[in-house]
Amino acid sequence: QVQLVESGGGSVQGGGSLLLSCNGSGWPFVTFRMAWFRQVLKKEHEGVAALDSRGSSMYSEFAKGRFTISVDNAKILWLRMDNLKPEDTAMYYCAVGPLGVRPISLENSDYTIWGRGTQVTVSS
């Protein structure tokens, strides 16, 4: 069974940086999509950035120019976050899904396996 474990969250002042990682075990997909989402309180998960095994990537508007998503050969998913703002405060989750035929997306329903999250807190 696949398990995803996020790490790297913490507290940082506005303008600072954090590097999140997501380590998975029991990898089930030959082709895949991977993404970072975030959630504030009990609101809906908000897409941050995604990539897939075709080499595509996408970012939400708020993430463009500040966040960078990447995956290494060991299939560890990373999210580099620079110039953090207080409004970036949230629980950050990684998620994985089969590639399928749909284009890359930040739709929750395209991702079938989720981690438990890592908290990011940005102070002003």
Image: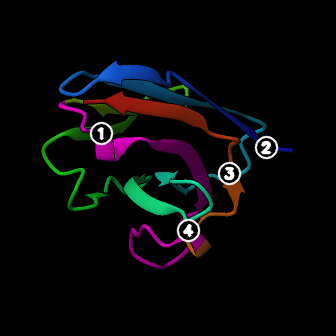
- Kindly identify the residue that appears in the image at 43 percent across and 67 percent down: 106
Residue 121 at x, y percent in the picture = 43, 31
- Kindly identify the residue that appears in the image at 49 percent across and 73 percent down: 107
Q: What's under tag 2, amino acid-wise?
A: Val
Q: What's under tag 1, amino acid-wise?
A: Pro
**Would you say the residues marked 1 and 4 are in contact, meaning their CB atoms lie under 8 Å apart?**
no
Q: What's under tag 3, amino acid-wise?
A: Trp
Q: In which quarter of the image is residue 94?
A: top right
- Label 3 or label 4, whichever lies nearer to me, is 4
In the displayed structure, does residue 27 sit left or right of residue 87? right
Q: What's under tag 4, amino acid-wise?
A: Glu
Q: How crowded is mark 1: few (under 14 residues within 10 Å), some or many (20 or more)?
A: some
**Quadrant where the N terminus lies?**
top right
**Quadrant where the C terminus lies?**
top left
**Would you say the residues marked 1 and 3 are in contact, meaning their CB atoms lie under 8 Å apart?**
no
**Residue corresponding to mark 3:** 114
